[in-house]
Amino acid sequence: MLVLVINCGSSSVKYHLIETEETAEGETLCKGMIERIGAVTSIVKHEPVGKRHIKDSKVISDHNEAMQEIMSYLLDEKNELVSDEVKIEAVGHRVVHGGEMFKDSVLIDNDVLEAIEEAFDLAPLHNPPNLKGIEAAKKHLPDLPHVAVFDTAFHQTLPRRAYLYGIPNRLYRRYKIRRYGFHGTSHYYVSRQYYKITDLPKEETRVISCHLGNGASVTAIDGGRSVDTSMGFTPLAGLVMGTRSGDIDPSILFYLVEKEELSLNSLHALLNRHSGLLGVSGYASDMRDLISEAHNGDRRCQQAIDLFCYRVKQYIGSYYAVLNGCDAILFTAGIGENSPLVRKKSLENLDGLGIELDDKKNESVTPGMVEKISSDNSRADVYIVPTNEELVIAIDTAKIARATRHSP
Ligand code: ADP
């Protein structure tokens, strides 16, 4: 089934056109994105696999026009992607926050649209553009099934002790303040890839999955179910990230309000946009830039890398205890897949837990491949597993679209 996967941000729309039945893994036929929607000019990229890529600038004022641009490109016969014989049959939407309502992907109907809107308060930066994207796509493809796949769904199996905060319980009951966790689609995908290649029964397997990109999170997976995760009520919690602080003592906020008279908006910007690797290094949020400057002797860039890796190690240790052991640690996303240095530093001096990297394997990984990088003596295996969130969205969408077709 040919599925269009849509991922909308506040000023961007990313898309993937995926054939889900071509191979067991699915086949991406084309991807693209429109950035800087609403700016004087927007950037348009269409990247059909194995064909000429297009990069252009156009005036695109809202998500609806962005969808219009994507559909005109995909439906243009010259591009040989969609035709009368090979039609798009379903649309999958990434939705960041499903609150406590959604434990799985769902066919979008009016109730689902309402529920996504109800979660606006929980994810004010993400859910409103996600909804805009759904509305725009429904306008252009009104007769197709549209499916929502939630970043939070995989973590809905967290036990109460892992998702409650130590605050008055009425706040959970009234406002649903609790840990939700994010990157669920990625943690789900890499853990499934691990069970597949090792042929291990997921019911008996304990996995720690480290999604290390610009946003970063670690998840403890027991018997295939997420039992704890480092992001919380919002994606701000947990690891030190590109520009997000990760965990801090909440009293720092009261102290800053007093010392610098910061407004709520400034605090929000401070922790979300000016902290993390960028804040600590005072130089960059991008790990590649930091590694290269640290190599040239920049002490603050080195400190940022050290802090990032130390926090990953802390979570791995914590989840080792949560899971009462661990069969495999998985690294994924931009940093996890590509930085031998970060992987090495994050697993440094963990021989007490029996975790040992094979330095040579860690250094010589083929990009895009699943590879084992632990030594033969290591008690837990360490793997690199490239993530593919769009494929999970496409496969879930196809499954739900097929079931819808067959239901009376
Ligand atoms: P997101 O999807 O959250 O925006 P990505 O998963 O694309 O982020 O990861 C982006 C991060 O990956 C950046 O910090 C980038 O520097 C880092 N990265 C990519 N390639 C490498 C590499 N070869 N070495 C170190 N870091 C890398």
Image (cartoon, rainbow, N blue to C red):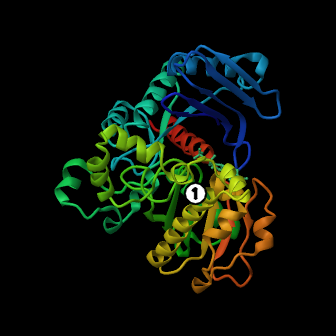
Q: Is residue 238 above or below residue 79?
A: below
Left or right: 310, with 48 as reference point: left
Q: Position of residue 26 (x, y in %)?
A: 69, 45
Residue that numbered label 1 is attached to: 211
Q: Position of residue 284 (x, y in %)?
A: 60, 46
The residue sitting at 32% across, 33% down in the picture is 114
Quarter of the figure with residue 294: bottom right
- Front-most of residues 202 and 136: 136
Disc 1 element: strand
Left or right: 121, with 362 as reference point: left
Residue 196 visible to an observer of this rendering: no
Q: Position of residue 318 (x, y in %)?
A: 46, 74
The residue sitting at 68% across, 79% down in the picture is 356
Mark 1 vs ligand 1: CB below 8 Å = yes
Q: Position of residue 242 (x, y in %)?
A: 55, 49
Residue 89 visible to an observer of this rendering: yes
Query: In what quadrant of the picture does the N terminus appear?
Result: top right
Quarter of the figure with residue 374: bottom right
